[in-house]
Image (cartoon, rainbow, N blue to C red):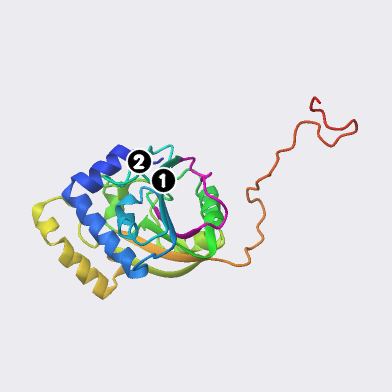
């Protein structure tokens, strides 16, 4: 079940631990995508803490927030780019997104297969998606005082396997949140030091969060039992002798 948008906003913008987490995640994301000049960037779940660096250079930035979570206007002091949407039906045309960030969206979804199909639908053939998920081996997944303690945590192998089954090809991965999930002053003051040590040593098992960048598989694989979309749903008895039952 998705977390409430008010709880997520409180954590990331009004607590020291949330601001430190935001800073650590954003630093790793910018290692993968330093800029998005002229590109269309979308975030799903609660990705807005990470999207601000792209506002200036991107052609468009869109923040998709699922109905189960709720929506808040963002960014503050600027024209709103937040959109409330259904979890598995996004108001985006096929192949229109160059960069997609999913944060607090996949691990709390009740239908991760359909969500990943929707993500694959909107990402362009040359686009990339970044999946940010709690690491099942890390401390953050074991602490329900942060948003990363909710939903299903993943190992790197589980994430990559899941993405591969939905037409995504994992390209590279990083970890973040090496600091303990504590709001105590000592840990907050040393947060950047812990993150620096973790990044240099690349101890992925110690990171609270895994970031996996993936491209789209082209052509897509043929899968059985995948949800299909009808452009015009069939009406009852349509196609039977006697013609279309709709009134003239």
Q: Is residue 99 magenta?
A: yes
Judge whether 58 appears above or below 77 on screen: below
Q: Is residue 207 visible?
A: no
Which residue in the protein does label 1 denote? 108
Query: What range is drawn magenta here?
Result: 85-102
Residue 56 image-quadrant placement: bottom left
Which residue in the protein does label 2 denote? 3
Residue at figure coordinates x 25%, y 61% from the top left: 24
Residue at figure coordinates x 19%, y 51% from the top left: 17
Question: Residue 38, image x and y in percent?
Answer: 42, 64
Are the residues flagged by discs 2 and 1 in contact, CB closer than 8 Å? yes
Residue 189 image-quadrant placement: bottom left
Horizontally, is 58 left or right of 244 in the view?
Answer: left
Horizontally, is 10 left or right of 120 in the view?
Answer: left
Q: Main secondary structure of the magenta part?
A: loop
Question: Residue 248, image x and y in percent?
Answer: 81, 26
Query: In the rendering, which numbered label is found on residue 227?
Result: none
Question: Residue 75, image x and y in percent?
Answer: 30, 47
């Amino acid at each position: 079940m998705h977390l409430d948008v008010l709880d997520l906003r409180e954590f990331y913008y009004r607590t020291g631990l949330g601001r430190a987490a935001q800073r650590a995640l954003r630093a790793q994301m910018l290692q993968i995508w330093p800029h998005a000049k002229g590109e269309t960037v979308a975030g799903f779940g609660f990705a807005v803490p990470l999207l601000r660096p792209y506002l200036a250079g991107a052609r468009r930035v869109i923040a998709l927030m699922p109905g189960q979570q709720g929506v808040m206007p963002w960014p503050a002091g600027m024209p709103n780019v937040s959109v409330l949407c259904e979890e598995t039906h996004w108001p985006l045309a096929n192949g229109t997104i160059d960069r997609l960030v999913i944060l607090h969206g996949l691990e709390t979804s009740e239908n991760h297969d359909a969500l990943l199909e929707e993500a694959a639908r909107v990402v362009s053939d040359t686009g990339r998606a970044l999946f940010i998920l709690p690491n099942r081996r890390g401390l953050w997944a074991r602490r329900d005082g942060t948003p990363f303690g909710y939903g299903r945590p993943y190992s790197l192998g589980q994430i990559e396997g899941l993405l591969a089954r939905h037409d995504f090809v994992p390209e590279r991965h990083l970890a973040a949140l090496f600091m303990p999930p504590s709001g105590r002053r000592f840990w907050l003051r040393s947060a950047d030091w812990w993150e620096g040590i973790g990044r240099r040593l690349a101890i992925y098992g110690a990171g609270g969060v895994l970031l996996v960048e993936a491209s789209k598989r082209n052509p897509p694989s043929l899968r059985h039992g995948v949800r299909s979309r009808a452009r015009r749903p069939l009406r009852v008895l349509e196609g039977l002798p006697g013609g279309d039952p709709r009134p003239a």
